Image (spheres, rainbow, N blue to C red):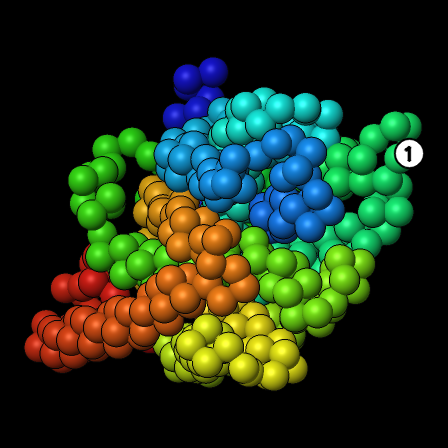
Amino acid sequence: MATEKVVAETATETASSELSNRELPAPPSNYMLRLDMRLLPVLGCTYTILFLDRTNIANARIEGFEKSLHLPSNGYNTLIWIFFIPFVLVEIPSNLIMGLPRVRPNIFLGINMLLLGVISFCQGLTHSYGGFLALRFLMGIFEATLPAGAAFLIVEYYTRKEAALRFAVFFTFGVLAPAISGLLAYGIRNMNGTQGLEGWRWIFILEGLITCAISGGVFALVPDFPERTKILSAADKEHLLWKLQRDKGDQKLDLKSVDWVKVLGDYRIWFPTLMFFCCDMTAASMASFIPTILTELGWKAAKAQVMSIPIWLTGLVFQVLSGWISGRIGYRFPFILMGIAMVTGGWIIQLIYSNNRGLAPEIRYFSLFLMSGGTFLQMSMTITWMTNNLRGRASAAVGTAIILGIGNCANFIASNVFITKQAPFYPVGFRTGIALTLTGAVVCLTFVAILFVHNRKLDRKRRELGDSAIDDQVEYRYQY
């Protein structure tokens, strides 16, 4: 087995060198479309699960689960942030395990999703606050593997130009989740009393069953990494590897002899992660508190579930359009700044409401559309920007894990600054949201300046020494 592994790795490296020295004709088949249809729906569903979990607890809240489980005053917020402790800690080890030669992504992700579905199902059966707390912690462990692993695979299969639209589509599945959850909650609430169970319990039971069902698709459809994939013909696979090599150079695919200190301290990972953290504060706040805010605007629980759907669909539209345009023009940061401006406008409206307490409900409702469009636009664009500027499988594995792990730590803040006793005005929550949004703008502009200086130095070196003096895995132009 060890000999076969060495031979396979040597063959991959040799093939990569040969591919870099010649042009390949266009493949006979449109394999990219088939690849998109095979990869994006099933990987997108793994991200849907993350947002379903974020929103189903918010929907269960307005259906009375706090009273049913006798939650303490801060119990709801605790249930939100306890999930993210293992979620953050597990992401990096999870991606590194998935990147090992003997680990198959479909098996790894499928098992974790199946276990996640079982735990989600059990949430609907628990009868104590302590039991629910324990299940939330376990969910964080298994759910951590899904979005980071999916993003890792997308990075490995697409060029930098192709990645923008693909990540937009991937994150679109996350935006769809709250809309789906709202519809499910609206329908499931009518199941109150079915089999002697309260309506909120069916939210977790049915969504747990859905997760288990989706895991079957993960087992069957998720492919291996590009150099080992069996879903493409030999000619299509050769063309894919050639295209990736031309775009990213001779990347190091194994995880041996990696300078982990350098990888873990890479500013190209941490700047986008901080930006993602800042915009995820808004996403976390919306997912957790939109149903509650809508009921406070005067809509009853049933209508509040439905009225949340257009908000999430707005995020979907902005996300896909920005990904498509960005992929064509090759820039990321202008779209991120546009998203920040939209979110800032939304937070300002919420803050005015908090201070004056006389703002028309329609205006506050409109602000949620601004926040949704701007937030989800930023999320897909930020992770695309980060992965565009990384090289090597180790960096891709660590980068996607950190940005989706540490970036999601904003949930710790969101779950503690939206204080139940301050409802419906949430002054601390709204001020924190606008402060972090503006911080994201500063980080974005600083990152652009650093990349600009790097590219200027690299261009000067190319002019003086020529391309032969440049290592394409260390010194390459960064994308803005």
Q: Nearer the viewer, residue 452 or 418?
A: 418
Image coords of residue 11 (percent x, y) = 43, 37
Image coords of residue 477 (percent x, y) = 27, 70
The three-letter amino acid code for the residue at tag 1 is Thr
Image coords of residue 285 (percent x, y) = 50, 59
Q: Nearer the viewer, residue 126 or 287?
A: 126
- In the image, taking residue 76 as reference, residue 32 lies left or right, namely right
Residue placed farthest to the left in the image? 464
Residue that appears at 54% across and 82% down: 358
- In the image, taking residue 107 as reference, residue 399 lies left or right, namely left
Residue that appears at 16% across and 75% down: 453
Residue under label 1: 194
Q: Nearer the viewer, residue 152 or 7?
A: 152
Q: Image quadrant of residue 261?
A: top left
Q: Quadrant of the C terminus?
A: bottom left
Residue that appears at 62% across and 24% down: 128
**Secondary structure at numbered mark 1:** helix
